Image (cartoon, rainbow, N blue to C red):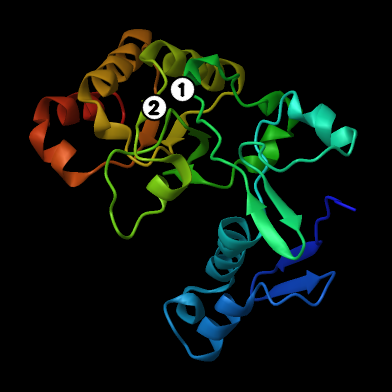
Amino acid sequence: DDMLEAEQISVILGRKYVITVQQDEYNCLKPVRDRLKHNLGRIRSMGPDYLAYSILDLLTDEYYPILETFGEELERLEEKEDLAGIPGTVVARDGELVRGPERDFIQDLDSLPFPARDLLDIHRYRGAQIGDRPVTNLCTSRGCSHNCHFCSSARFWGRRLRVRSAESVLAELEEVYERYGYRGVAFVDDNFAAIPSRVKAICQGIIDHGWDIWWWCLGRADHIVRNPDMVEMMARAGC
C-alpha cells in the first residue's frame, strides 16, 4: 500500500553544542558527519550555529521532500490517493523515490501577505541590531539572474529574479515603522540592488516619509560600482 511517511529528526542547538535525535536508523546525516570526522570545510571552526545550519541545509536539500503550496492537492492527500506526478512532491514507491515535476514559482510577489508579526511576542525578537537599534527582516525579492558558485540562491529560487513593487515594500516598511516601532531594517534579498530604479524608488519613499531608519542589504559589487547615484540615494535613505 502506498503510504506517506515522514521520519522525525530533532536538532537541538545549544551555546556550545548541537544534538541530533533520529526516529529511525537512516544515515541521512553522513555527509555532515564525514566533514566533521575528516575536518573538511569550515564546520569545526565556525561553531555550533554553522553546524546546525549545515544539518538543516542537508536535510532540506538532499533528504526530505519539500511540499509547497499544495492547494487542491490536499484533498488527494487526505483521501490517500496516489500523489505521484503532483508538482513539487517526492513519493516513495517500491523503495525508490519518484519525483514529480517542478512546481511553478509564485510570480506576483505583491499578492503575498506581509509576515504575521502580530502572532509573535515581537519584543522577544529584538536581539539583532544595527548600532543600538533592533532590526526586523524584510524580503522584497526572490531569485537571482546570476549563478555564483558560492551561493545557493539559484538552487532555491531559480535564475529568474522576481521582485515586489516599491509600493509594496514601502507599505511593509510603514507597518514595521509605525505599528511595531522598528528603526532598523535588514533587507535579506540575495541581491537587493539588482534593479537600481526600484532601489531608488524605495529610497525616495523612505526620504519622502521622513522615516528615521537604519538599514542594510546585500548586493553585487558590479551593481554598486556601476550605479553611484543609487548608492548616494541609499546613503541618504539610511543605508
Marks 1 and 2: in contact by CB < 8 Å? yes
Residue 127: give x, y in percent of width and height: 58, 47
Mark 1 lies on a secondary structure that is loop
Residue 171: give x, y in percent of width and height: 48, 13
The residue that label 2 is drawn on is 162
Marker disc for residue 107:
1
**Callout 2: few (<14), some (14-19), or many (20+) C-alpha neighbours within 10 Å?**
some
- The residue positioned 57% from the left and 71% from the top of the image is 51
Q: Is residue 8 above or below residue 133?
A: below
Which one is earlier in the sequence, the residue at label 2 or at label 1?
Answer: 1
**Callout 1: few (<14), some (14-19), or many (20+) C-alpha neighbours within 10 Å?**
few
- The residue positioned 80% from the left and 40% from the top of the image is 82
Q: Give the amino acid type for the residue marked by disc 2 in the picture.
A: Arg
User: Which sits in the foreground, 124 or 86?
Assistant: 86
- The residue positioned 74% from the left and 56% from the top of the image is 92
Q: Give the amino acid type for the residue marked by disc 1 in the picture.
A: Gln
Mark 2 lies on a secondary structure that is strand
Residue 200: give x, y in percent of width and height: 24, 19
